[in-house]
Image (cartoon, rainbow, N blue to C red):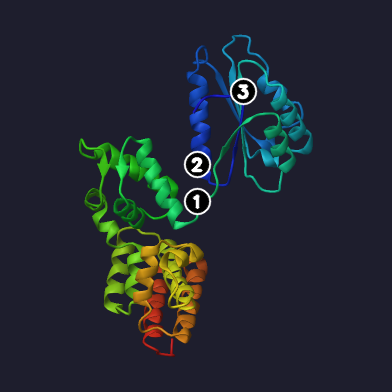
């Protein structure tokens, strides 16, 4: 990433924003004559009027500096004006790096810095399943490796959706892969065997399929191996919501078109359609109620998150079987 006099990193994906800033700081200090550049790291809300001038003033010892202003949208109106004015006429030997959440707050600053010609790096929130798969593939490319779709899905199932954890897992796999540049599903399974077999999604799949004993076994193993109760509950909610969304779609709907509509990959739509056998709308409604209660309980309302999840699994299986009592 080439250094620029002024760069603004825009978006709410914290991991990507932090890494972009880190890469920019490194690139700026690696530039010729900048190895000893000072780095000033400040929050936008903490910067007072005139503070930018102080940070960007030439050092008595030379060498330039790198100034990072995080959450620039929180800067006061006066400071925001100073930042926009500076972007139009940056000082020599200074690299200014701003981060901005990208929302309505501080939009005048964002527009002004962009209009001044600053380098813009977008870091939008990664929310969809397909976007996380793309992120995993990009991480392996960054490390000089390639991963097929099966490997990317297996890693996502094993590690979960946190980008920091996914990036660390990709680094580990890339470093320890064989001399060939491809990372496959077998390598993922070898490193994450216990965790991959006991993710929240495995629990959810067994529950919505009506396999109570298997679901409880997966749940207990997942909890024993450190999978977060919140992630397990989220997977249960996702599994039940997909039942509802796919069941309400036309039976003849194309899997790819339906996948785009509900935000899941086509292969998952096919899985959910098979899982729907044995379900009716009343049962799905009861299952949704069960996971909504469990979500509140694992986030603090219950004394035992483990018990709340086990109860939710039992209620989901009961709802599929048509049992009205909870």
Residue 144: image location, x then y, percent: 32, 35
- Of mark 2 and mark 1, the one earlier in the sequence is 2
Q: Name the N-terminal-most of marks 3 and 2.
A: 3
- Give the residue at x 73% y 31%: 84
Seen from the viewer's position, the closer of residues 240 and 193 is 240
Q: Which residue is label 2 attached to?
A: 16
- Identified at 48% across, 25% down, the residue is 26
Q: Secondary structure at mark 1?
A: loop
Q: Position of residue 150 (x, y in %)?
A: 30, 54
- From the viewer's perspective, tell me whether residue 63 is left or right of residue 322: right
Q: Is residue 317 visible?
A: yes
- Which residue matches tag 1? 126
Residue at 40% over, 83% down: 279
The picture quadrant where one finds residue 235 is bottom left
- Marks 2 & 1, CB-CB < 8 Å contact: yes
Relative height, residue 170 to residue 234 (above, below):
above
Residue at the disc numbered 3 = 5
Res. 204 visible in picture: no
Distance from disc 1 to disc 3, alpha carbons, whole Å, reads 28 Å
Going from the N terminus, do you reach mark 1 or mark 3 first?
3
What x and y, as percent, mark residue 284? 46, 81
Disc 1: CA contacts within 10 A as few (<14), some (14-19) or many (>=20): some
């Amino acid at each position: 990433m080439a250094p620029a006099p002024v760069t603004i990193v825009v978006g709410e994906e914290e991991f990507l924003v932090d890494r972009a800033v880190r890469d920019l700081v490194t690139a700026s200090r690696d530039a010729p004559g900048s190895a000893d550049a000072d780095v000033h790291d400040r929050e936008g809300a903490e910067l007072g009027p005139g503070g930018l001038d102080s940070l960007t003033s030439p050092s008595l010892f030379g060498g330039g500096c790198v100034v990072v202003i995080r959450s620039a949208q929180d800067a006061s109106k006066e400071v925001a004006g100073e930042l926009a004015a500076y972007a139009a006429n940056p000082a020599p030997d200074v690299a200014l790096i701003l981060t901005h959440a990208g929302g309505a707050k501080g939009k005048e600053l964002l527009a002004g810095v962009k209009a001044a010609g600053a380098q813009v790096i977008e870091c939008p929130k990664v929310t969809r399943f397909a976007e996380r798969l793309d992120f995993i593939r990009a991480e392996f490319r960054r490390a000089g490796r390639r991963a097929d779709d099966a490997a990317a899905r297996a890693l996502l199932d094993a590690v979960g959706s946190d980008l920091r954890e996914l990036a660390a897992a990709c680094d580990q796999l890339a470093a320890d892969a064989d001399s060939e540049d491809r990372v496959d599903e077998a390598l993922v399974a070898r490193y994450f065997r216990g965790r991959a077999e006991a993710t929240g999604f495995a629990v959810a799949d067994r529950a919505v399929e009506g396999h109570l004993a298997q679901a409880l076994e997966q749940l207990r193993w997942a909890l024993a191996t450190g999978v977060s109760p919140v992630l397990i509950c989220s997977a249960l909610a996702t599994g039940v919501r997909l039942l509802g969304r796919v069941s309400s779609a036309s039976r003849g709907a194309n899997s790819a078109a339906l996948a785009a509509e509900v935000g899941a990959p086509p292969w998952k739509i096919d899985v959910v359609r098979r899982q729907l056998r044995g379900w009716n709308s009343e049962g799905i409604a009861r299952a949704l109620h069960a996971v909504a209660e469990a979500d509140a309980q694992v986030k603090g309302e219950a004394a035992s998150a483990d018990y709340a999840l086990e109860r939710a699994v039992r209620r989901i299986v009961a709802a599929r079987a048509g049992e009205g009592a909870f």
